Image (cartoon, coloured by chain):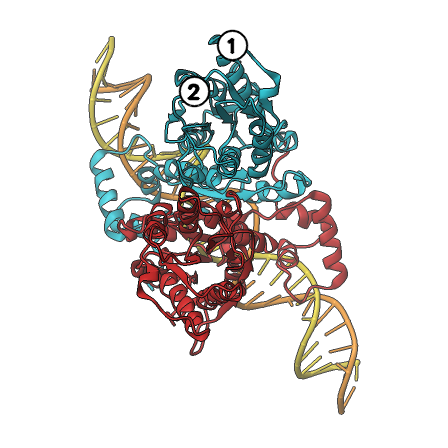
Chain colours: A cyan, B red, C orange, D yellow
DNA sequence: GTAAGCCATGACAGCACTGTCAAAGCGAGC
DNA sequence: GCTCGCTTTGACAGTGCTGTCATGGCTTAC
């Protein structure tokens, strides 16, 4: 294998100094355009790539963005990675993924990698995005970060999210539009911010459309299949069962479908079921699940964008934020009442 | 924020040269034990972390392991990452994740990051692990790599895998042990190595137990829910349907379950269903799926281990390999005939 | 024609480590 | 007491790049 080619090789071939090559590589101004062209030609011919270690040692950037997560949903995690990487690649950055055990001590997990790697920024996903120790450490180490979270108003950090409340509102409205007036709702884990927002959306839509709120139509779940299954059993094994159930995530909605199957309730003829998240599981049932798609990859890309543009180190009153649009995915599990 | 502390700070405080600190940090021999202790005490007191960029610039290692994937299954991808990271952390290495579009041109995707980052090794998962251009490029750039793949005998690279054939054999034997003699089988995508191995295992078990092979019991699928659904329709909507169906992955098995539900066939009383992979979906149906668990995280950890120990650059005839054990997960979807 | 100012370029000193090699220290053997 | 050979330590030169500052050429304004 040929010896690694360096900035000196390019400089020699182009008949300029290494500093000029450096300028061209970094798109700095004040290089005559024919010099620039000549250097670029040599770069292409030699297939030169700047060494990232040397770059980050000499400069202030590491060309590395971190993603911290402790998310039980693999689909979520990979979507975030894909979205973030797509944006990072455009800028020649790379992604370091770091799973965090948010139940364990944070300092010991994060401090070594933060001081060792000197990443240029970090993307935080739920539930790590709400972990006070993580945020405190990042701030102490002066590493810019962006939170992807349903809870927007932490007010101290850049933020990317989606309007969970409105999404739940619209899903409920969709059900009501189908003629349902008696709609069960399954809550998520009480510790998640999204849980409350989604419930609020449901409750608001019911109220706005004149559907009587009934406490016995709202069951506690914990975002898991089993909890959805059990909540659905409580909701559906009674004489006056609702005509539709809106579970606040897909796993729980799948639990509802399983109970419906057991009870020989045809979906959607006898029961409409709606979920939230559009996980892979939503398409792996029959009938396929009506749900809400979060633009996860796009949110991650937006987070990376904030970091790459340096906006995560904002000046002024309010940190930058981006709210992306959700999408109502209407499939076969919902039908007219 | 305090100025970054460097090797010089440690050297000064400990009253030694930076080289000695370097020796201690790298666990090199020939350091007197009380010198070592003194340095380590200062390192701890100052909370010193060597700068990874400087290290990799000066030395030959980058402290970076890459994971290349183009895998449609998020659960698989995250399991690989988790397993690899666990092993990497022990050694102070980090993971760079790089999604590859294996349908697109490889050189342009990989060459930049390979020459830029100079990773110490790369872990390849299916289907990238079988992509000739990827392997050729890695070899040209002299980057050690380990393949995680069902196809072991490529003979030119380090390899970690699982015995798919035997796993399928045992699952089939499990069904036979339950009293089934007429077992349907759904093939996976013909381009995947695992497809053939799993089918071989099924066929061998049937033969070994004296169950007559019937061509009309083997249906083509493509590893997707829909293909499993359609194959199951062909298998089950006939008078002499099999008493059990073994789908060669979980997504297809879920398709079988959906068809069974539609046909009002009780699982497992009237039909046993088995899958393969133990994806999250396997627990998100009722009844839960009997399946085969691949030790994905463990395989990734083994792959990282081979890389970290330098065994992926082997000398001699046969490349190193590790075959890990699968696990038969018997849940409720299989029962006696 | 000359001073002022900008643009384009280069020399050089880091950046924080590791590799190499030389030197110092130390014990054993004679 | 001296040499030999090993262990322990340090000086110093890279490693490939960026930041800073100096320099020279060229344009503009008077």
Q: Residue B125: x percent and y percent?
A: 42, 56
Residue B292 is tagged as none
Q: From the viewer's side, name the closer residue of B326 and B148.
A: B326
In the displayed orientation, state which residue is furthest to the front.
B239
Kindly state the secondary structure of the residue where label 1 is placed.
Answer: helix
Query: From what the image shows, is residue B25 above or below residue A189?
Result: below
Q: Is disc 1 surrounded by few (<14), some (14 to 19) or many (20+) residues within 10 Å?
A: few
Query: The residue marked by circle 2 belongs to what chain?
Result: A
What percent of the width, then of the height, locates residue A4?
36, 57
Between A171 and B135, the one lying in front of the other is A171
A228 vs C1, left or right, is: right
Q: Is residue A98 shown above or below B106? A: above
Question: In the image, are marks 2 and 1 on the same chain?
Answer: yes
> What is the distance, in whole Å, between disc 2 and disc 1 at their CAs?
14 Å
Task: Please tell me which residue is depicted at 69% across the width and 40% down the height of the picture.
Answer: A105
Dot 2 lies on which element?
helix
Residue A296 in the image, given as x and y percentages of width and height: 43, 32
Q: Is residue A289 visible?
A: yes
Q: Which residue is mark 2?
A: A175
Q: Compare residues B307 and B298 and report the one nearer the observer.
A: B298
| Quarter of the view holding residue B147 | bottom left
Locate the N terminus of chain B by quadrant: top right
Q: Give me the residue at 52% from left, 43% from top.
A: B286
Q: Residue A77: horizontal and vertical position, in percent?
A: 48, 40
Q: Is residue A282 above or below residue B212?
A: above
Tag 1 subunit? A
Marker count (numbered): 2
Q: Is residue A59 shown to the viewer in this render? A: no
Going from N to C along the chain, the mark reached first, 2 or 1, is 2
Q: Which residue is mark 1?
A: A207
């Amino acid at each position: 294998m040929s010896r690694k080619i360096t900035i000196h090789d390019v400089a020699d071939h182009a008949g300029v100094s290494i500093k000029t090559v450096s300028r061209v590589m970094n798109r700095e101004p004040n290089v005559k355009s024919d010099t620039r062209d000549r250097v670029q030609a040599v770069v292409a011919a030699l297939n030169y790539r700047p060494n990232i270690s040397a770059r980050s040692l000499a400069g202030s950037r590491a060309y590395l963005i971190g993603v911290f997560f402790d998310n039980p949903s693999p689909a979520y995690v990979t979507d975030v990675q894909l979205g973030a990487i797509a944006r990072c690649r455009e800028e020649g950055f790379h992604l370091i993924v770091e799973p965090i055990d948010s139940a364990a001590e944070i300092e010991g997990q994060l401090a070594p990698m933060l001081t060792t790697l000197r990443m240029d920024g970090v993307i935080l996903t739920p539930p790590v995005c709400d972990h006070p120790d993580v945020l405190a450490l990042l701030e102490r180490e002066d590493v810019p970060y962006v939170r992807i979270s349903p809870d927007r108003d932490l007010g101290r950090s850049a933020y990317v999210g989606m309007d969970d409340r409105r999404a739940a509102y619209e899903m409920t409205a969709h059900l009501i539009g189908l003629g349902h007036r008696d709609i069960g709702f399954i809550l998520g884990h009480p510790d998640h911010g999204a849980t409350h927002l989604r419930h609020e959306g449901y409750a608001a839509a019911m109220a706005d459309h004149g559907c009587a709120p009934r406490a016995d139509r709202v069951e506690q779940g914990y975002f898991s299949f089993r909890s959805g299954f059990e909540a659905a059993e409580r909701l559906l094994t009674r004489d006056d069962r609702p005509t539709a159930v809106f579970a606040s995530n897909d796993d729980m909605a799948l639990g509802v479908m399983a109970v419906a199957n057991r009870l020989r309730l045809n979906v959607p003829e006898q029961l409409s079921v709606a979920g939230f998240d559009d996980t892979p599981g939503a398409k792996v049932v029959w009938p396929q699940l009506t749900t809400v798609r979060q633009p996860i990859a796009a949110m991650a890309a937006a987070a990376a964008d904030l970091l790459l543009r340096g906006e995560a180190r904002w000046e002024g009153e309010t940190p930058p934020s981006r709210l992306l649009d959700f999408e109502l995915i209407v499939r076969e599990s919902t039908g007219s009442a």
